[in-house]
Amino acid sequence: MKKRGISRWQMVLVIVAVCFFVGVTAGAASSAALSPEQRTRLVGYVSGFSGDNGFLSSFIKHGKYIVCIWLCGFLNSGAAIILIIVFGTGLFYGFSASFSASERGMAYIISGILPQNVILIPLYIFTAVWSLMFVLEKFTNNGPKSRIKRERCKHLKEHAIILALCLAINAAACLSEEYIAGMIDSIL
């Protein structure tokens, strides 16, 4: 029986997932470390921004991370930047979920944060893994075939298709944020 090793794709997936969950943990820990005075000021600050943002605002808010991660696939140092973006996104989600749970309770997390993030978090991780693989593929020498213009064109087309697919899934997440979150909120 042949022993099967870990593929590059699996290794990149593990690195991205660990980076994201370390960010979530750090964000939750930093939220727990806030003093009561800081919490009060933050609640006052956040209450000025809460409200219905609408589809376009949500689409742009979430889409900017996807586009930034995707564009980093073209940079030589893109792998490090992608991991920093993934860590920062995890930090943001960890802090906001922990802070919201302590201030507004779990019902708010289930109705206001969970519906769109069930779609968005795997989407961020997929986009990061795809873009990291794109960066790594640029520096892999697959013989003379890798230098053919047709092959490069094919990789660029695949990369562009992935962006379009990710933005379409982002639109679905924004629709769930706008409609499904409201339905869940009315039930709870």
Image (cartoon, rainbow, N blue to C red):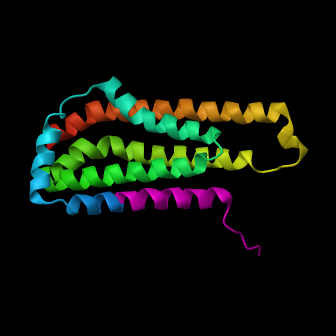
Q: Quadrant of the N terminus?
A: bottom right
Left/right of residue 175 with respect to residue 52 in the rendered view = right
Q: Which residues are magenta?
A: 1-24
Residue located at (59% from left, 45% from top) = 78
Left/right of residue 1 with respect to residue 133 in the rendered view = right
- In the rendered image of this protein, does residue 3 appear above or below residue 50? below
Count the marks. Answer: 0
- In the rendered image of this protein, does residue 12 appear above or below residue 49? below
Left/right of residue 167 with respect to residue 118 in the rendered view = right
Residue 15 location, quadrant: bottom right
Q: Position of residue 181 (x, y in %)?
A: 24, 37
Residue located at (61% from left, 47% from top) = 77
Predominant SS of the magenta segment:
helix
Residue located at (88% from left, 48% from top) = 143
Q: Is residue 26 magenta?
A: no
Q: Is residue 16 magenta?
A: yes
Q: Position of residue 133 (x, y in %)?
A: 64, 49
Viewer-nearest residue: 84 or 169: 84
Q: Position of residue 6 (x, y in %)?
A: 66, 66
Residue located at (44% from left, 56% from top) = 20
Residue 65 location, quadrant: top left
Left/right of residue 31 with respect to residue 131 in the rendered view = left
Q: Position of residue 123 (x, y in %)?
A: 47, 43
**Residue at the extreme bottom:** 1
Q: Quadrant of the C terminus?
A: top left
Viewer-nearest residue: 57 or 40: 40
- In the rendered image of this protein, does residue 63 appear above or below residue 107? above
